Amino acid sequence: MKAEILTIGDELLRGEIVDSNKAVLSDRLLGLDVETHWQSSVRDDPEQMTDAFRRAVGRADVVLVSGGLGPTRDDLTSRVLAESFGRKWLLDERALDDIRRFFRSVGREMTENNAQQARFPEGAEVLPNPIGTAPGFAIEEQGAWVVCMPGVPREMQRMLEEQVLPRLASRLGARGSAIRARLLRTFGMGESTLDAELADLDLGDVVLGFRTTFPDNYLRPVARAASAEAAEAALERACALIRERLGALVYGEGGETMAQVVGHLLRGHGETLALAESCTGGLVAQLVTEVPGASDYFLGGVVAYSNEAKRDRLGIPQELLDAHGAVSEPVARAMAEAVRERFGADIGVATSGISGPGGGTAEKPVGLVHVALARVSGTHADHFVFPLDRARHRLLTAQVALDWVRRALLGVELVGPSLLRRKE
Amino acid sequence: MKAEILTIGDELLRGEIVDSNKAVLSDRLLGLDVETHWQSSVRDDPEQMTDAFRRAVGRADVVLVSGGLGPTRDDLTSRVLAESFGRKWLLDERALDDIRRFFRSVGREMTENNAQQARFPEGAEVLPNPIGTAPGFAIEEQGAWVVCMPGVPREMQRMLEEQVLPRLASRLGARGSAIRARLLRTFGMGESTLDAELADLDLGDVVLGFRTTFPDNYLRPVARAASAEAAEAALERACALIRERLGALVYGEGGETMAQVVGHLLRGHGETLALAESCTGGLVAQLVTEVPGASDYFLGGVVAYSNEAKRDRLGIPQELLDAHGAVSEPVARAMAEAVRERFGADIGVATSGISGPGGGTAEKPVGLVHVALARVSGTHADHFVFPLDRARHRLLTAQVALDWVRRALLGVELVGPSLLRRKE
């Protein structure tokens, strides 16, 4: 079974946004053993869209389309698809009701142009959109199954998971070989080092892929076998071998973020966290509080961006700041200990560094950062020089801070990252 | 002049990486008034590649290809391109020398398979790669200019900027029509309302596009004229009309973020900011400190996630918390005033809400949020119910907080958003 992915929108062809939908769609199709053979993008242009629709239907068994379902004049997917295959373009009263109801639920008025979102090619199966106004739909055309979804990533993803993949799975029935894949999330070691570290492992028929999403490196073992059970067993064995080799470097699996893992551990240990952030400027707190229910273990923090804030809001002695500077181990230690004490937390973590691009000196270069973690048993501190741009410097520092909380709770060594290179 | 972008690689079609090269290429082409009409991706498969090459050459004037120039057996771009158009595939001794030299410079040995990177279709112009082993190249075929570049983003970008774009600019010479586009960033009004609001504006030949990157809505006027000057003038006039109609809803242009605009205004007014965050959990501070040099105007903040933190770290009276609850206007006001005073800032901003998914009651539903802004002249507060998921609730709340700082400094009304929908 061959799939084609078609994304539609002038904004893509002008390079205004990076089209992440294609990767999501291909990845999820592969989870059902369906390989994507073509990906294309066209503008909001009827002629180009027609050309693309016809070509896709002519060569693929499944065509996933995203974009062009909105209410504005340049949203043409539904109408052009109907015209491309000589179908009428019909109003669906139930879909129109759904759209009206959606607008009422958010307390807004439906405008005239939203009604076009309730019109579909004749014979279409409408796919409701629980979190937006644009329903999706599917048609059968010349043996191909053509599914149109919204371009908004979260609406597309929800429709894909809840409506498109289940329908596709049932269409697939009992077919050829099974593929199973898993994602192991690691932090702290560079990709080529990971590769070398795992080189002598005998993973059998499991193929090991590497992916990097800064600051993490992901391992993607893929097992292919005659049955789903055999693929799953081979995958399970491979993951166990990898985890045994890498130990605490593997922090999670699948969609788990570092902050989720940390939250889970804090809750499990019944411990609480407080943060004193300088260079990360609230980023660590933001990552921690992204996780629902973080109030169970996160008490709060101080973003002590100025020296005055460090002195007055955390009680760091002026003499310590004068003697060592704000970016120093003594100040980072004092910040972690102060925030732990002031918030009455079990664990206090502090960051202080120079994320750049300005602010460096010969002695304290741009990229220098001190991290400290205080518990009742004592305070651990270390410093690193990350030769990265501001955004990645902050992100890497925040991840070290979170990883230290994880390592402290697991009772393993608080090490820093040796990962400073990306996949290329 | 029409461009087509073609990216090659199994990893793209498996969804293992998000293909950001396409957006970069399209964006930079548009800077030379060249519109991308098609983007496609194919696997490392000779038949599909040949098909894609021939189609691109048949419909586009410029074809930019990335990927498939590496040393491995699945890097086929150069050979397949030669075969697709009946050209010989020839070794280029100078390119081979360059590759040898590159390996020596990084202290590694050149392997046999690297030599295939020095073979090109007959008649190709070789484009050296100063930061990698894979040279690029360009050929003329049936009136189209076909350029092949490496898939590694930084190698591709450097080759594009230094070698491809200058050659393309000189090829363009004095040609037909010019295109100019601009991006106006708005916050606070939904896309379809914006569309309706601007419907009666006579923008002449300027075409108005809409984009949404939550929580913002962007307007993209595109002007096409016989000369660059005429296009620029038409664009200028259209932007002036739009800005006149929308007033403070337009907060910035191009790549400017809300936090950058706020930072610019704070610096210009010589005022300072402090933040008291509950439901946004550090997100506002993180956005403010993403901007280099934020320490000029940002003093810091308190992430007061627990009631104890609100009481002990901000001095919110326990009676106030007991009487109204943490998510209330009196508490939000007190937080903004307290953080302003404690940090000695000109402006204090506070957020307190229920981002969900849990924690709501009949009286205070999930989605409720109070925002307050305190200045020496007084405190403004308001509340909203945003029926959004946790991540978007926090993001929208943070953007309201920043927008209020902007509006306060501009001396315009502190209004809330009526935008709660994305494109589609």
Image (cartoon, coloured by chain):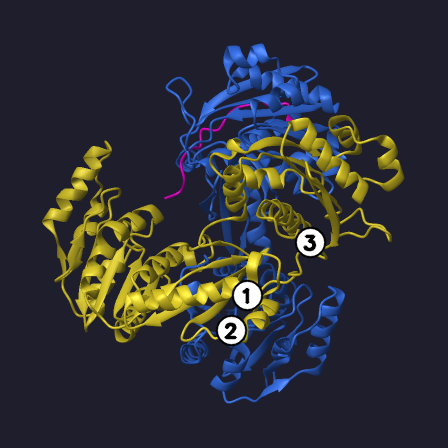
Chain colours: A blue, B yellow
Give the quarter of the image for residue B147. Answer: bottom left
Give the quarter of the image for residue A229. Answer: bottom right
Q: Would you say the residues marked 1 and 2 are in contact, meaning their CB atoms lie under 8 Å apart?
A: yes
| Above or below, comparing residue B251 to residue A412 in the picture | below
The residue that appears at 23% across and 31% down in the rendered structure is: B107
> Depth-wise, is mark 1 or mark 3 nearer the camera?
1
Q: Mark 3 points at which residue?
A: B389
The reply to whether the magenta stretch includes residue A423 is yes
Under mark 2, the amino acid is Leu
Marked residue nearer the N-terminal end (3 or 2): 2
> Depth-wise, is mark 3 or mark 2 nearer the camera?
2
The residue that appears at 36% across and 61% down in the rendered structure is: B26
- Marks 1 and 2, how far apart in space? 9 Å
User: Which range of residues does the magenta coloring cover?
Assistant: A410-424
> Callout 3: helix, strand or loop?
loop
Q: Give residue B245's mark.
A: 1
Q: In this rendered view, identify the residue nearer to me: B41 or A120.
A: A120
Tell me the subunit letter for badge 3: B
Taking the image as shown, residue A236 lies to the left or right of residue A418, namely right
Marked residue nearer the N-terminal end (1 or 3): 1
> Callout 1: helix, strand or loop?
helix
The reply to whether the magenta stretch includes residue B343 is no
Taking the image as shown, residue B92 lies to the left or right of residue B338, namely left
Under mark 3, the amino acid is Asp
Q: How many marks?
A: 3
- Marks 1 and 3, how far apart in space? 32 Å
Residue A389, image x and y in percent?
A: 42, 36
Under mark 1, the amino acid is Arg
Taking the image as shown, residue B48 lies to the left or right of residue B195, namely left
Q: Give residue B201's mark.
A: 2
Instruction: Decide if residue B243 is in sight here.
Output: yes
